Amino acid sequence: MITVHEVAEHYGVSDAFMVRALAKIGFRQDKPETALPTPTVERFEAEFGNKIRAARPKPPPTFTAETDAAPTASRAVRKPMPHVMRVAHARVTGTRLPNGMRVKALLADPGPVHAIDAAGTRDGDPWRGEVVPAAVHFFDGSINSGPTAACGWTHMRAVLGDEFVPADDPSGAGQCPRCAALVADGKGFRDPPDPYGFRSPFCDAYLRLRVDGNVSVKDCTLRDFHDGPHRARDGAEWEVGVDDYVPSPDEVGCRITKAS
Ligand SMILES: [Zn+2]
Ligand SMILES: [Zn+2]
């Protein structure tokens, strides 16, 4: 059986968050090592899975003025992160862990694999320029979302820690021929980094704030150049920032404050 703490780790939230969230769906236990019945894990996913994924913070911008902390030596000599062209899959599947939790999984036969420079995507490079064979990162969101590959193919659903090494015979090796040709020419990098590539139809506004003291990040889910206020997936709206923020239905009655 899976414990409260293990589920918290899976979702990237604190044990304290888990305990509060579980209490909301009727499971009152305050110990991280408490084992959770499978139906409770499923109920948690149904109630909170999308909300947690929608609120996951983005990596901070690279060149933020840092006034609240003294610059460390390593920060002063920080070099640009090396870009690794990685293997990306346009199709993934779902599976169930023995404990019943649904998770994404790679397909044994994903079709031609593409190349992606993950450093310029919204999620950033999960391995910060290191090659980590067999590691995998799944992109959140619907099946029709996800960053573009080097060739411009949209909606990559997973990026691997492996480096994309163009084969002599790309098609025979299961590689996208256009991606392989671009990488072989040293092209296909996101420079300047562009989270979605030129095809993005979506507004990229987001708002960081605190809801009852917890930092939350709201992504606008509307189309690019939309009219009216930005709107997050949970229904929250804002035009400029926290001062004109209209909470989502779940946040009514919560204390909304600036994140910093
Ligand atoms: Zn491709
Ligand atoms: Zn917007």
Image (tube, rainbow, N blue to C red):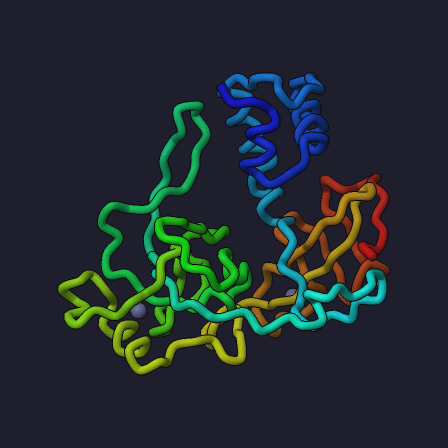
Q: Residue at x 62, y 20 (%)?
A: 33
Quarter holding the C terminus is bottom right
Residue 217, given in percent of the width and then of the height, sits at 69, 53
**Which quarter of the picture shows residue 185?**
bottom left
Instruction: Name the residue nearer the viewer: 118 or 234.
Output: 118
Left or right position of 259 against 218: right
Q: Residue at x 59, y 59 (%)?
A: 221
Residue 157 visible here: no
Residue 77, given in percent of the width and then of the height, sits at 67, 72
Number of numbered discs:
0
Instruction: Name the residue nearer the viewer: 19 or 255.
Output: 19
Left or right position of 89 against 10: left
Left or right position of 253 against 106: right
**Which quarter of the picture shows residue 117?**
bottom left
Task: Using the image, determine if residue 133 lies above or below residue 178.
Answer: above
Residue 133 visible here: yes
Q: Residue at x 46, y 60 (%)?
A: 130
Instruction: Name the residue nearer the viewer: 243 or 158.
Output: 158
Residue 116, given in percent of the width and then of the height, sits at 39, 67
Residue 156, given in percent of the width and then of the height, sits at 39, 60
Q: Residue at x 34, y 44 (%)?
A: 93
